[in-house]
Image: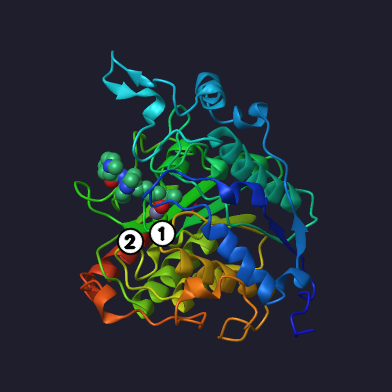
Amino acid sequence: KNGIQRPKGYTVSYHANPEMEKMHFGPKHPMKPWRLTLTNKIVLAYGMHEAMDLYIPRAATSQELKDFHREDYIEFLQRVTPTDNTWDPESGQYLFNTGDDCPIFDGLYNYCSLYAGASLDAARKLTNLQSDIAINWSGGLHHAKKTEASGFCYINDIVLAILQLLLHHPRVLYIDIDVHHGDGVEQAFWSTDRVMTLSFHKYNRAEFFPGTGALDDTGPLRNDSPGAHHSLNVPLHDGIEDDQYIKLFQDVVRPCVRTYQPTVIVLQCGADSLGGDRLGCFNVNIKAHGACVGFVKKFGLPMLVLGGGGYTARNVAKAWAYETSLCIGAEVHPNLPAHTPYLEHFGNEKTLFPKLDSTNRYENKNSRVYLESVVMGIMEKLRYLQG
Ligand code: VJV
Ligand code: CA
Ligand code: ZN
């Protein structure tokens, strides 16, 4: 009925299991799986589903989760309930780093295996060539470690998806535009040259989670390890603006692709890098966030598109719906369709591209000279990879 057509010459798949959207981390916890419902409502209201292959993926099996995570940790997630006493008197901590950031809630294991299952499903659609761009907005949970939860993340669906891609691809480029450092993915692939990880994030070792991801952070590696120079970090300060962010992203990603020559790209689209986010501190608008997705798409490589953080739900939903439209190459009207359900949640903002109001702006602490020095630092690392 409206003009959203299937893209010509390539296939986009959308992987979403509505069962996980009902989960609750607990009152006042910033992570709201319900933002995915809001995203899907906008995607459907525009008619974008007509242009994609839609899948309701099955949950990942415990065996699949153990391809990265340690058995005892998975078994803990499988059996633990909110009423268990998970306090370990010996270490004086909750088991496997659960607690305030990573609470034990009802349906936790179901939630984890569903978002991981969706990322695995998306990766498999890429490897069996049924899809060229595969989208899972419920994934992108980049902090989870082999043996513990971290920063709202329990299972690292990104690592699992990349392991799947590595069965068919020689080189995977992972790009992470969540406002937080993609430490779990970086760590998992520290020792290999078959994955290059590149994270853009707010960096402040003492004050901003997780405190890693400085420009010269190379992990525990020796310079002669195969993985050396394959974890790249773009540390940023508060308040970065649209034009700066877009230029920086392009100036960094372009030489990474040229030098590393990946055969597939995984893009984590954490929406907490948007201005006005409850946890974020940048001034990036939805169009600029989307411009990163559009830029990566132009390389024409198979692409796995994932969600991540994002704590002001109405903005998250608009950004990911807009980025879905970019993936299918559809022009969408800048106003939400009148029949969009939950329109009341968008307040007076019926536009897909709300203006960041001045009360939500952070003072920009990123000078031109600073950003140039970051690009130089990245270029220096890339020189090690040439011949
Ligand atoms: O900064 C931290 C760690 C603390 C200890 C735990 N307290 C609760 C907070 C400070 C040092 N954690 C960060 C984790 C951010 C995770 C981001 C995840 C992603 O976007 O990168 C990928 C999905 C943090 N920042 C803010 C909070 N935690 C926070 C947690 C809460 C909360 C308010 C803020 C947990 C429960 C409740 N309120 C009720
Ligand atoms: Ca990041
Ligand atoms: Zn984040």
Report the residue at 39% width, 23% height from top. Answer: 95
The spot of residue 354 in percent (x, y) is 43, 81
Question: In the figure, is residue 207 to the left or right of 17?
Answer: left
Residue at numbered disc 1: 311
Label 1 crowd (10 A; few <14 / some 14-19 / many >=20): many
Q: Nearer the viewer, mark 1 or mark 2?
A: 1
Find the residue positioned furthest to the top: 90
Q: Quadrant of residue 85?
A: top left
Instruction: Note whether ligand 1 is within 8 Å of mark 1.
Output: yes
User: Mark 2 sits on what residue?
Assistant: 280
Residue 77: percent from left, percent from top: 52, 27
Which amino acid, mark 2? Gly
* Of residues 26 and 293, the one drawn nearer to the viewer in this rendering: 26
Residue at the location (39% across, 68% down)? Answer: 274
Label 2 within 8 A of ligand 3 by Cβ = yes
Q: Residue at x 44, y 25 (%)?
A: 83
User: Residue 365, located in which quarter of the rendered image?
Assistant: bottom left
